[in-house]
Amino acid sequence: MRGGLVASARLLPRPLVRWFLQRRAQQDINENMSGGKKVKIIFVLGGPGSGKGTQCSNIVEHFGFIHLSAGELLRAEINSGSENGTMIDTIIKEGKIVPSEITIKLLQEAIIKGGNDKYIIDGFPRNEENRVVFESVTLVTYFQLLQINISPEFVLFFDCSEEEMERRLLGRNQGRSDDNIETIRKRLKVFVESSLPVIEYYESKGMVKKIDATKPAPEVFEDVKAIFTHMA
Ligand SMILES: Nc1ncnc2c1ncn2[C@@H]1O[C@H](COP(=O)(O)OP(=O)(O)O)[C@@H](O)[C@H]1O
Ligand SMILES: Nc1ccn([C@H]2C[C@H](O)[C@@H](COP(=O)(O)OP(=O)(O)O)O2)c(=O)n1
Ligand SMILES: [Mg+2]
């Protein structure tokens, strides 16, 4: 539909196309922003192996959110053979965090492509740089005519012991290059040093909903469900 629109737009004078897109963008803003239906973003954070991906699948199934995993977007970028692929691959194998501009660009593209008004973003922001850069960018849509600022509704934090996370990662069995004991130890260290401060920042703003993630997955989802049912 959008493709057909773009194709026919080529035949029209540019000022007219611009006017049409701006008008449509404004209609969307009115509908989405002032009608109480603004785009909802929830950050899902927690250490590696805390169960973010598992619970996000449940949230998608029960509550109609689109799930964006920063890690999965980065792995897809590696597999796509992009020019940044090798660099991203090396950083992930070292258990480090990829520069924000790369991850945020992938997230922005996925949000625009998603066309939904509810997103759970898993594994982001993973450090202060991720958080600060994301706060400063705007989501650019409609060929850059419309800019929407995006900030999270709240942060879901899966709190899990290191021993349990390590045990789960060693048994994850998804063929990931970072699920080996050496990289796992590095990632757990990076989590404490770089990701926990982000969670503390959101805690200081009263935005964190903490979940005991050491329990079995169905029990964790009961707690998750309570939060999402409450917000619906
Ligand atoms: N509550 C849980 N108890 C036990 N194992 C779990 C639980 N949640 C997830 N797992 C398993 O642990 C591994 C890591 O879970 P995953 O959802 O990929 O975590 P994350 O995305 O936070 O790294 C997977 O093999 C998953 O099946
Ligand atoms: N915001 C992010 C998210 C992930 N990454 C990189 C570094 C992480 O160790 C890997 C894997 O992330 P992912 O969220 O898939 O990992 P877990 O599900 O927590 O095990 O991707 C990143 O650099 N920046
Ligand atoms: Mg994950």
Image (cartoon, helix red, strand yellow):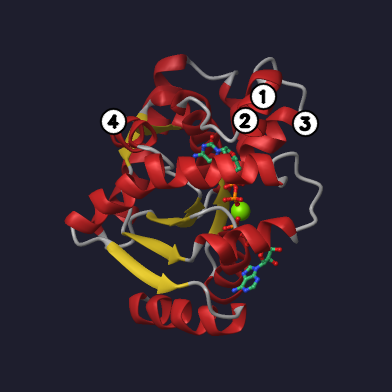
Give neighbour class at mark 4: few <14, some 14-19, many 20+ (Cα, 10 Å).
few
Q: Which amino acid does label 3 sit on?
A: Asn
Element under label 2?
loop
Q: What residue type is labelled 2?
A: Glu
Element under label 3?
helix
The Cα–Cα distance between marks 3 and 1, rounded to whole angstroms, is 13 Å
- Residue 163 image point, x, y percent: 56, 63
**Image height check: is 174 above or below 13?**
below
Q: In the image, which is nearer the foreground, mark 2 or mark 1? A: 2
Q: Which residue is drawn at 35% across and 31% down?
A: 129
- Quadrant (top left/top right/bottom left/bottom right) for the C terminus: bottom left
Whichever of labels 4 and 1 marks the residue nearer the N terminus, that label is: 1
- Quadrant (top left/top right/bottom left/bottom right) for the N terminus: top right
Contact (CB < 8 A) between labels 4 and 2?
Answer: no
- Residue 17 image point, x, y percent: 45, 24
Give neighbour class at mark 2: few <14, some 14-19, many 20+ (Cα, 10 Å).
some
Q: Mark 2 points at which residue?
A: 94
Q: Which residue is drawn at 52% across and 78% down?
A: 220
**Image height check: is 46 above or below 127?**
below
Quarter of the view holding residue 60:
bottom right
Q: Which amino acid does label 1 sit on?
A: Thr
Q: Mark 4 points at which residue?
A: 136
Q: Which residue is drawn at 51% across and 32% down?
A: 97
All told, the count of numbered labels is 4
The Cα–Cα distance between marks 4 and 3, rounded to whole angstroms, is 29 Å
Q: Which residue is drawn at 59% across and 19% down?
A: 10
Q: In the image, which is nearer the foreground, mark 3 or mark 1? A: 1
The Cα–Cα distance between marks 2 and 1, rounded to whole angstroms, is 6 Å
Whichever of labels 2 and 3 marks the residue nearer the N terminus, that label is: 3
